[in-house]
Image (spheres, grey):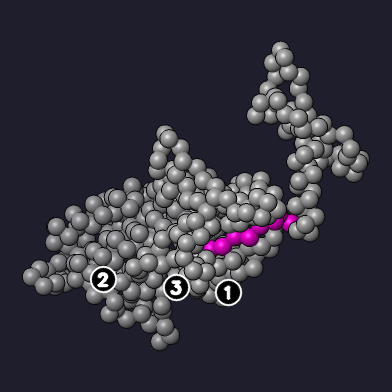
């Protein structure tokens, strides 16, 4: 910001507003360019007035409303009456890009596992899924495990994924209404390396006789059901496909191998991994809508969508329509936030159900015996 600002200094503010004024003055001083011809000015009164107008209009809450589709992806949000509120809310929600990316990668890895299970002889859709031994859940649900808790920067990061972490269970209870009685964390019998290797090699040597599972024109070997192999280092979406492809080529069934993913699942990513972006796309000036977008000449891939947006389903996939195209009843976005209040929530069971749509079958549809 240059120094040619004509915004008046902060003067007419009551003593009750001194902390607010001091914060604005401190921020204003840091934004002004100083040189030999310009005197430092104090910014803030203009923005203070706008913030107070917005606060009064919305009874002390941040103005705006946002929508999400059933797959839990934020797609657009609209704000009023000051345009800078869009940037304020941007800072609040942009952290969702991490959650979206972790969830997307987790689901994609489960898809890979299910595909290879089916290719190597496991009839996943036909597996029984009733208590006390829901085979579909046991064979699929426990083949990808979240091992990232100890390596993340915070317990909030660890809470994004998986029943392998206590923070994950707490998040399901606190934010997604999972009943405490149903909050049972389960996992595979895996342990940290040193607790296993300290037993010595001789203890780990067993004599095993594999069975076979048959697919048309090919048979795949399968270990006894009480014995499985786990790979817990370096597991990502890419390496998972490489490993399972090698397992298939060697003639082994994919059900022999379970995986633990940690750093690659929770931290080996950034906002551009899934091209997550939150942008202002439309503004109303003097009662007329005007499209807002960015189109950097240095990176055409970062051109943002413009005008009033709608998220619609076309040909079995989701796509975003721009510039007010499409009918209102096509829009998949559901309002979840308005003026500082959450107006729509989903429970843990609903989220699981939606997340499993499009997979060869549901994993967590466990039924009573």
Gap between marks 1 and 3, in whole Å? 17 Å
For the residues bearing labels 1 and 3, Cβ distance under 8 angstroms: no
Where residue 173 appears, as percent x and y from the top left, is 58, 67
Label 1 neighbourhood size at 10 Å, few (<14), some (14-19), many (20+)? Answer: few
The quadrant of the rendering that contains the N terminus is: top right
Q: Which residue is mark 3?
A: 353
108 or 122: nearer the eye?
108
Residue 143: quarter of image: bottom left
- Helix, strand or loop for disc 3: helix
Question: Is 64 a magenta residue?
Answer: yes
Q: Earlier in the sequence, mark 1 or mark 2?
A: 1
Regarding residue 20, the answer to whether it shows in the image is: yes
Left or right placement of residue 119 versus residue 14 in this view? left
At x 76%, y 30%, the residue is 6
Question: Relative to 1, does residue 37 appear above or below in the rendering?
Answer: above
Q: Which residue is mark 1?
A: 179
Where residue 62 appears, as percent x and y from the top left, is 71, 54
- Helix, strand or loop for disc 1: loop
- For the magenta stretch, what is the residue range? 60-68
Question: Is 168 a magenta residue?
Answer: no
Residue 231: quarter of image: bottom left
Question: Relative to 205, does residue 40 appear above or below in the rendering?
Answer: above
């Amino acid at each position: 910001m240059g120094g040619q600002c004509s915004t008046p200094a902060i003067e007419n503010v009551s003593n009750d507003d001194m902390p607010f004024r001091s914060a604005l003055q401190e921020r204003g001083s840091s934004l002004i360019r100083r040189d030999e011809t310009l005197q430092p000015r104090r910014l803030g009164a203009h923005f203070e007035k706008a913030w107070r107008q917005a606060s009064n209009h919305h009874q002390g809450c941040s103005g705006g409303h946002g929508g999400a589709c059933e797959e839990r992806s934020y797609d657009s949000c609209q704000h009023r009456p000051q345009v800078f509120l869009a940037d304020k809310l941007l800072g609040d929600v942009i952290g969702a890009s991490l959650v979206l990316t972790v969830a997307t990668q987790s689901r994609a890895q489960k898809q890979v596992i299910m595909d290879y299970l089916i290719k190597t002889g496991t009839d996943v859709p036909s597996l029984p899924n009733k208590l006390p031994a829901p085979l579909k859940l046991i064979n699929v649900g426990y083949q990808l495990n979240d091992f990232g808790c100890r390596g993340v920067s915070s317990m909030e990061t660890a809470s994004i994924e998986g029943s392998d972490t206590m923070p994950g269970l707490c998040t399901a209870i606190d934010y997604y209404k999972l009943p405490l009685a149903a909050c049972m964390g389960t996992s595979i019998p895996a342990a940290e390396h040193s607790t296993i290797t300290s037993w010595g090699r001789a203890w780990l040597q067993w004599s095993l006789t594999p069975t076979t599972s048959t697919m048309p024109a090919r048979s795949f070997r399968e270990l006894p059901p009480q014995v499985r192999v786990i790979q817990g280092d370096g597991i990502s979406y890419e390496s998972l496909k490489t490993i399972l492809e090698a397992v298939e080529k060697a003639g082994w069934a994919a059900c022999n191998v379970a995986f633990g993913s940690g750093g690659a699942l929770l931290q080996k990513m950034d906002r551009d991994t899934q091209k997550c972006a939150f942008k202002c796309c439309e503004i109303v000036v003097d009662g007329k809508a005007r499209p807002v977008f960015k189109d950097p000449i240095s990176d055409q891939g970062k051109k943002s969508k413009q005008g009033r947006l709608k998220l619609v389903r076309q040909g079995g996939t989701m796509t975003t329509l721009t510039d007010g195209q499409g009918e209102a009843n096509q829009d998949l976005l559901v309002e979840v936030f308005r003026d500082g209040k959450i107006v729509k929530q989903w429970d843990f069971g609903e989220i699981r159900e939606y997340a499993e749509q499009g997979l060869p079958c549901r994993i967590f549809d466990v039924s009573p015996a």
